[in-house]
Image (spheres, grey):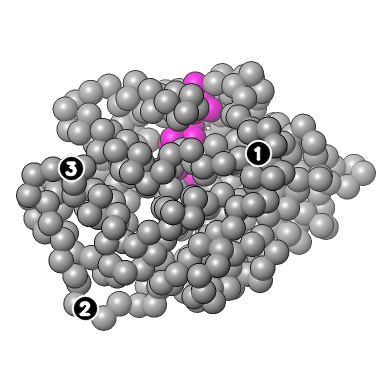
């Protein structure tokens, strides 16, 4: 098996329409794509935290167009995509938080399900499109709380509105693929990508473990953890992003044979408990950081969740590169550089280079 690489020559000059470019993963991906010479048109809502990675990296100044608009608005989305006439579409815009989805189920379904319908509906009109990657999540599978990793051909499900909305987005993608794409008169190869719990420098989202930990450590407060024994497939943000890029390269070059669902998770050893991750963060951060358990009743969240990534390894040559210890080191390095007022674009580009050269 040949190990695949993100091919900067491939991306040079490619027109990419990226939804969710103002978010955590979207900002890293915008930086990576623009550093390779891709022409990125982004489409998302304005960032909703201060600070946020989009502004810290000055993404707006580096990509071709930044549309600040809602994916629920089909007409605006259609005209933005037509104007960009992209070769490649990567759809990442979503309401991505489990607990928020319990409080706002209607909004979560509207953005994640009808938003995906709107993105694929807009894509139908774009003759230039050759590859589309729809980003969902490991949580899209029907969770059986078992020790084995889920394979791409297992049933969709999702207990909570977020997970379930992503299962629905997978079904929407599959129906659109079969009904409208990769036919004699349409050469857009449409795939979906299911990744694990992403961590990395520059995530200021609410209600996520690493951002919460950093906030607590910086304020010299004890971190409160909801579910210390839950295991998750932890991975550095550059891991799934490299998977999306390699998948898009493959779709573009090989077409419909790769148009299906793909898992991009960490190695087995990196399916670890929340408590282990926090212990690693504490030893990396240093000082007097500590955590305690949140005794309050919590809404249901999956306890055991693992992905089987044999298909990506065998058919795309994609393998995870950075283990959890390395990922945590990179987060601490990034956050401490940010505290020290370093040029975060340079720091982030250096991490992308280190990742690609690993
Ligand atoms: N972070 C993770 O651990 C993780 C894990 C698996 C999958 N994912 C998926 O990856 C994608 C990106 O996640 P993230 O962590 O960067 O989240 P994020 O919250 O940082 O970014 C979400 C992006 O979606 C945009 N968005 C939200 N609602 C929108 C709307 N109505 N119209 C237009 N844009 C809208 C936001 O503006 C932002 O750009 C999501 O699809 C998420 O479900 C994330």
In the picture, the disc for residue 296 is: 2
The residues tagged by marks 2 and 3 sit, at their Cα atoms, a distance apart of: 27 Å
Counting the numbered discs, the total is 3
Query: What residue is pinned by disc 3?
Result: 285
Q: Which of marks 2 and 3 is nearer the N terminus?
A: 3
Callout 3: helix, strand or loop?
A: helix
Viewer-side label of 2, 3: 3
Q: Where is residue 7 in the image (x, y as percent from the top left)?
A: 62, 25
Left or right of residue 314, residue 38 in this image: left
Query: What residue is pinned by disc 1?
Result: 317
Q: Earlier in the sequence, mark 1 or mark 2?
A: 2
**Disc 1 + disc 2, Cβ < 8 Å:** no
The boundaries of the magenta stretch are 20-35
Left or right of residue 30, residue 14 in this image: right
Callout 2: helix, strand or loop?
A: loop
Q: Residue at x 54, y 37 (%)?
A: 242
> Which of the 4 image quarters holds residue 254?
top right
Query: Is the residue at mark 3 in contact range of ligand 1, meaning its CB lies under 8 Å from it?
Result: no
Q: Is residue 24 magenta?
A: yes
Left or right of residue 105, residue 299 in this image: left
Q: Reply above or below: 200 against 302.
A: above
Q: Residue at x 64, y 32 (%)?
A: 4
Q: Which of marks 1 and 3 is nearer the N terminus?
A: 3
Q: Residue at x 73, y 59 (%)?
A: 174
């Amino acid at each position: 098996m040949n190990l695949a690489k993100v091919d900067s020559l491939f991306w040079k000059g490619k027109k990419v329409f990226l939804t969710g470019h103002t978010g955590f993963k979207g900002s890293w991906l915008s930086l990576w794509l623009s550093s390779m010479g891709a022409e990125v048109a982004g489409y998302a809502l304005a960032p909703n935290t201060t600070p946020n990675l989009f502004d810290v990296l000055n993404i707006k100044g580096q990509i071709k167009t930044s549309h600040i608009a809602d994916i629920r608005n089909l007409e605006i989305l259609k005209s933005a995509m037509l104007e960009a006439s992209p070769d490649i579409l990567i759809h990442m815009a979503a309401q991505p938080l489990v607990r928020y989805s319990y409080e706002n189920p209607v909004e979560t379904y509207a953005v994640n399900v009808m938003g995906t319908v709107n993105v694929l509906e807009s894509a139908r009109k774009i003759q230039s499109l050759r590859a589309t990657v729809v980003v969902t999540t490991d949580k899209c599978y029907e969770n059986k709380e078992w020790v084995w990793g889920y394979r791409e051909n297992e049933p969709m499900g999702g207990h909570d509105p977020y997970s379930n909305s992503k299962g629905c987005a997978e079904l929407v993608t599959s129906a659109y693929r079969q009904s409208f794409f990769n036919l004699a008169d349409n050469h857009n190869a449409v795939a979906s990508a299911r990744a694990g719990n992403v961590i990395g420098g520059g995530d200021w989202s609410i209600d996520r473990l690493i951002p919460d930990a950093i906030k607590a450590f910086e304020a010299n407060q004890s971190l409160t953890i909801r579910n210390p024994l839950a295991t998750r497939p932890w991975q550095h943000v550059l891991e799934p992003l490299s998977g999306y890029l390699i998948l898009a390269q493959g779709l573009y070059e090989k077409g419909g044979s790769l148009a299906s669902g793909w898992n991009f998770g960490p190695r087995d050893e990196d399916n670890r408990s929340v408590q282990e991750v926090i212990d690693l963060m504490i030893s990396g951060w240093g000082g007097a950081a500590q955590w305690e358990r949140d005794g309050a009743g919590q809404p249901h969240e999956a306890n055991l969740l693992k992905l089987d990534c044999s298909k990506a390894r065998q058919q795309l040559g994609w393998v995870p590169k950075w283990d959890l210890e390395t990922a945590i080191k990179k987060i601490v390095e990034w956050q401490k550089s940010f505290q020290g007022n370093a040029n975060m674009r340079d720091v982030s580009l250096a991490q992308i280079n280190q990742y690609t050269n690993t």
